[in-house]
Amino acid sequence: MAAQLTHDNTHFTAVKSHTILVCDGVTSPANIGGLFRLCDSFGVKEVYFCGTKIDLSSPRIKRTSRSTHLLVNYKDDLDTLEVLKQLTKQGYKPLALELTTNSEALEELDILEKRPLALFIGNEKTGISKKVLASIPTHVHIPMHGNNSSMNVTQAAAIGLYGLSLKIKEI
């Protein structure tokens, strides 16, 4: 029978990707903590919290992040459109994780060129702001098969980062 592994007996090689996660108005301490944890898990280069000042004294952020807020590079209290402009200048391909009339399913996304990615996610209730969404040419969505058309932002980010990690390996 297989034995379950623990943090103490499992050794992973830490790898940093060139992917950046950009959070447009994510405010919930639970989601912020969860996003730190995800970014550590996927080796995200950096996470940008736009429209939000992070309070690292928050017990909820600390508990949910499981100390990964100490490991992941981040910037906060940024303007999303300015971040988009700067990342585009630096050669990043911006991707909006949002269901829109122009979005394609994540698994259908073709990444033909090897360049760093910036995955944009939105506010817990309203998603990515309209101005930001209009400024990002590529929209991707997670195909869903239930009655609901949305999911928690941290869950969506996890699926989005995992899907991109598979795409990056294909290049």
Image (spheres, rainbow, N blue to C red):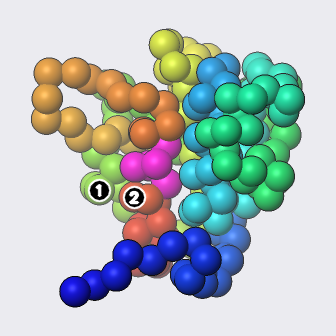
Vertically, is 77 above or below 9?
above
**Which residue is the site of mark 1?**
107
Residue 39, percent from left and from top: 63, 54
The numbered mark, 2 or 1, whose residue comes first in the sequence reads 1
> Which secondary structure type mostly characterizes the magenta part of the structure?
helix
Element under disc 1: helix
Please name the residue shown 48% across and 31% down the image.
153
Please name the residue shown 72% across and 53% down the image.
68
Residue type for callout 1: Glu
Quarter of the image with the N terminus is bottom left
Q: Depth check: 128 or 74 in front?
A: 74
Element under disc 2: helix
Please name the residue shown 48% across and 13% down the image.
125
Q: For label 1, count other residues whose C-alpha is less than 10 Å away and answer few (under 14), some (14-19) or many (20+).
A: some
Q: Which residues are magenta?
A: 157-161
Q: Is residue 88 left or right of residue 74?
A: left
Vertically, is 77 above or below 129?
below
Q: Depth check: 147 or 169 in front?
A: 147
Q: Can residue 100 be seen? A: yes
Which label was assigned to residue 163? 2
Q: Depth check: 51 or 89 in front?
A: 51
Q: Is residue 26 left or right of residue 124?
A: right
Vertically, is 24 above or below 154?
above
Quadrant hosting residue 4: bottom left
Residue 60, percent from left and from top: 68, 29
Residue 158 falls within the magenta-colored stretch: yes
Which label was assigned to residue 29? none
Residue 161, percent from left and from top: 49, 54
Residue contact at pointers 2 and 1, CB within 8 angstroms: yes
Separation of residues labelled 2 and 1 (CA atoms) = 7 Å
Residue 45, percent from left and from top: 73, 60
Q: For label 2, count other residues whose C-alpha is less than 10 Å away and answer few (under 14), some (14-19) or many (20+).
A: some
